[in-house]
Amino acid sequence: MNFPRTTAKPLATDVDVALIGGGIMSATLGAMLSVLEPTWRIAIYERLDDIAQESSNPWNNAGTGHAALCELNYTPERKDGSIDITKAVAINEQFQTSREFWNHLLTAGLMEGTDFINVTPHMTFVRGEKNVDYLRRRWETLREHELFSDLEFTQDREVISRWAPLLTEARDESEPIAATRAPAGTDVDFGKLTRQLVALATSRGAGLHVNHEVRGLKKTKQGWRLSLHDRSWNAGVRNRTVNARFVFVGAGGGALPLLQASGIKEAKGYGGFPISGEFLRTDNPDVVAEHQAKVYGKAEVGAPPMSVPHLDTRVVDGKSYLMFGPYAGFSPKYLKRGKYLGLVTSLRLHNLPSMVQAGLRNLDLTKYLVEQVVLPSEDKFHELQKFMPTARPVDWEKITAGQRVQVIKWVKGKGGVLEFGTEVIAAKDGSIAGLLGASPGASTAVSAMLGVLERCFADRYDTWKPQLASMMPSLAGPGTSAVADDAASLTTDTVPAR
């Protein structure tokens, strides 16, 4: 898109960039554009009374700085027994890019405070001979790559006990176990990070409008006309319109209905399958002190990748917790604080074939979700005890996590396909884009938004490249390491180890 430079004071009814949703995606794109184009008029519209209340809220996600250090679903086993690390490498590189960007903003004085990220080792823990053998082969393959050269592996119970005592206490000694450990893993409070990025954007002139719900999108010659509804209890004017040259839909589960409302052909055929989740949480200081790691296990057969069990250290508002889960569930809502008819109202003639085929192909997932929903509380707690044999119900409470909407799309030659990653949908003319999907989501937000810049601002992207490369050295191309010094320093030099 070709925007004229302007130094005029932003007008409430005319902006260059409209960001829908007050989560990590809109915050990241808003921060980038406020640095790249300080004269552009940017506005953020959030339907709730505060930002970072849905998937970006620290209790609505696991807080893992996803770098494929511990997540087995990113390293599938091929038919010949070899381990495919392609996706793991890509995700790790994307997370390094995020760390580079955050570190640049901190060192440049554009953002303050590193308390949104804490050094927290990432571990994988498996039980049974078959899983132990797989984990060893995974480790042997990953450690050959420079991004994973520090990954450690052991079957020694004493070593695992030093790494994470709660995994071995009172465990049957005849059971084969193994673990890998990446000491430089991270725990990220994406809610706090979102607030810092939005604060950066607003300090440079962006407008933040909470309690403003976008209820309509209409294409115009200049861009888009947004129909806004003010949800404030004391709103003087409930409904108004805003003209925007570019629109980004970063509304999490609410992105699909808005992209459908825009009428762009690129959104046709897309559907979404909502999955909810629960976690167990404890703040018992005696228990929390015994476990300082994020430990991922192996998903049950038929379970979606987002349901991989993990026992995590979490640091939220300076306080440490342990969290275990997730326990998958189902709700027709597309947002945690959304409407129960979210799934139903997203159905269209153009996406029904995708939805039906994907449903038929994933009957095992449906069966798994039903089983999870009806699973008694004592059985759910037993899942925790598989990780932590000494766990006591009195120490733990149940919390409900955020909604995740998995992408369903029509793939030529395959039909309707259910996917578990994230995907950017953009109009051909670059005037509107949105992000669909879930994990690894927030951890790779910077790379995702760089993709939006490249696709939607092709006429300016080459001009921005030198500045972007100065922020994120890995973007300079071949010859520069994805694990740049700037990225590493964010969790070594500037962040105190726990």
Image (tube, grey):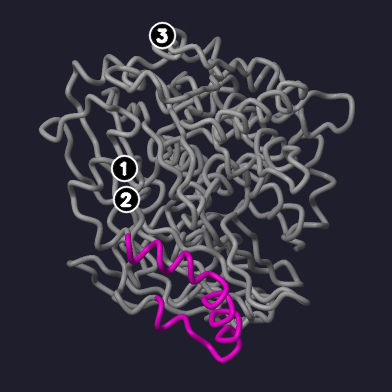
Crowd around label 1: few <14 · some 14–19 · many ≥20 (10 Å): many
Quarter of the image that includes the N terminus: bottom right
Q: Which mark is residue 59?
A: 1
Reply above or below: 273 against 187. below
Mark 2 — residue?
A: 401
Name the front one of labels 2 and 3.
Answer: 3
**Vertical arrangement, residue 19 with respect to residue 143, above or below:** below
Highlighted range, magenta? 343-371
| Residue positioned most to the left | 394
Residue type, mark 2 in image: Ala
Residue 166 in the image: state x and y as whole percent: 31, 20
Q: Is residue 378 magenta?
A: no
Query: CB atoms at circles 1 and 2 under 8 Å apart?
Result: yes
Q: Is residue 288 above or below residue 35?
A: above
The mark that comes first in sequence, 1 or 3, is: 1
Residue at coordinates 60% horizontally, 33% vertically from top-left?
67
- Prevailing SS of the magenta stretch: helix
